[in-house]
Image (spheres, rainbow, N blue to C red):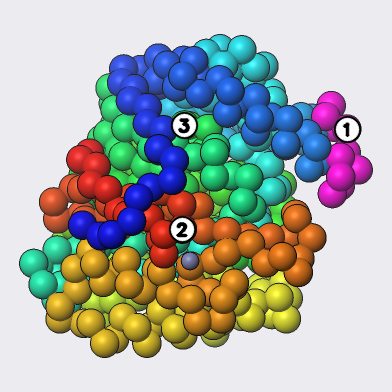
Amino acid sequence: MTKGKPRASLRTVRAEGTHREIGIKIGRECKDIARRIDRRMKAYARDCYGRSPAEELARARKVLPASRRFAPGFVEELEGYAEGSGLDFDSVFASVCDPEWEMKGCTDIAVNERWTRDDCVFAAHNEDVEPHNYTDIVLARVFPDDEPGYIGMNYGGIMPTVAMNAAGISMTGNALEPNDVRLGIPKMVVVREILRAEGLHDALKLSMPPGRGHSFNNIVCDSNGEIYSMEGSATTFDALYAEDGHLVHTNHYVSPRMWRFESDMHTRFSSIMRYNRAKKLLKRELGEVTVATFKRILSDHVGHPESICRHPDPRLAEPERTRTIFSSVFDLTNKVAWVCYGNPCEGMYEKHEL
Ligand SMILES: [Zn+2]
């Protein structure tokens, strides 16, 4: 639909059956990525927190019982993944708990049928993370026996960061840095659980479980055009509803109720700029929004390199750099995912059915 060539092909995986069978299949197919993520989790614990691998694994084990109660199916998927990839389960679970996921940036836009050319509901997203994550993301189709199936962009094939399920629920969102972080259910577990929802009520409830240790801003939409930005911290949240049928979110708290949970507003300039810029660009196209609208907005370079389409800033040390590793648009009405692997200014969006 757009000019340009993808520079590398996006890996895909498909798995169905019990949660354990799903985990085993994905673990086998994504063994190489699982090992890379494991090595990095251990290096990050050492370099940033001075924790040994044993200490990091012990820390993760503390939140396993609560995670298992909240997300029994996902924990079984992780057990299967450990078996399939040949890693031990404690290491796999510690990767899910990895504080490095706190570094995610991202820009999100959701628009409902009121403003789109073909009456579709869209949830769009740029995934902004450390550049090395580019080779760790996999397009996954997951069909558990006992839940709606989903299509998502999964780290290591197993940890969804954005996805849409067969019940017409999408989960997208972005990182926040709340100041009330505690030991609790990891936010990567929470986002996976949203996808087992059969409807909006359950999706919203699953997006903010009591006892969580942290939170993304979880954007939850359904095919009826209901759009929520669940601005969470570890201990509370505000549910921002798209009253006018469209919404933008980046990486700072928008709700006045949540301002006091912001760790350090002085680190949010890219977020503030992307938020305002995306809102302005979207406003111009309201009523005529199509997938091409998101390509235009999500490729925007105002404020480069910390723009909506983010590129590594050579002035920063390597661990501080951020890049858009993929851009996605879920069409909840037609249950289709459009994914551009790499920066959207350079690539094309390809269509993937659920
Ligand atoms: Zn770009």
Query: Which numbered disc flags the more N-terminal residue, 2 or 1?
Result: 1
Instruction: Label 2: state its secondary structure.
Output: loop
Question: Mark 1 sits on what residue?
Answer: 52
The image shows a total of numbered marks equal to 3
Task: Kindly indicate whether the residue at mark 2 contacts the one at mark 3 (C-beta within 8 angstroms).
Answer: no
Q: Nearer the viewer, residue 227 or 289?
A: 289
Residue 198 visible? The answer is no
What amino acid is found at the position of numbered circle 2 in the picture? Asn
Q: Is residue 48 rendered magenta in the image?
A: yes
Q: Which mark is residue 162?
A: none
Q: Residue at x 59, y 55 (%)?
A: 129
**For the point 46% across and 19% down, which residue is it?**
29
Q: Nearer the viewer, residue 61 or 159?
A: 159
Q: Earlier in the sequence, mark 3 or mark 1?
A: 1
What residue span does the magenta drawing correspond to? 46-55
Is residue 224 visible in this depiction of the protein? yes
Nearest-to-viewer mark from 3 and 2 = 2
User: What is the number of the mark on residue 157?
Assistant: 3
Instruction: Inspect the image, locate mark 3, and give the three-letter code of the amino acid beneath it.
Output: Gly
User: Which of disc 2 and disc 3 is earlier in sequence?
Assistant: 3
Q: Amino acid at mark 1?
A: Ser
How many other residues sit within 10 Å of disc 2, few (<14), some (14-19) or many (≥20)?
Answer: many
Residue at the spot of label 2: 343
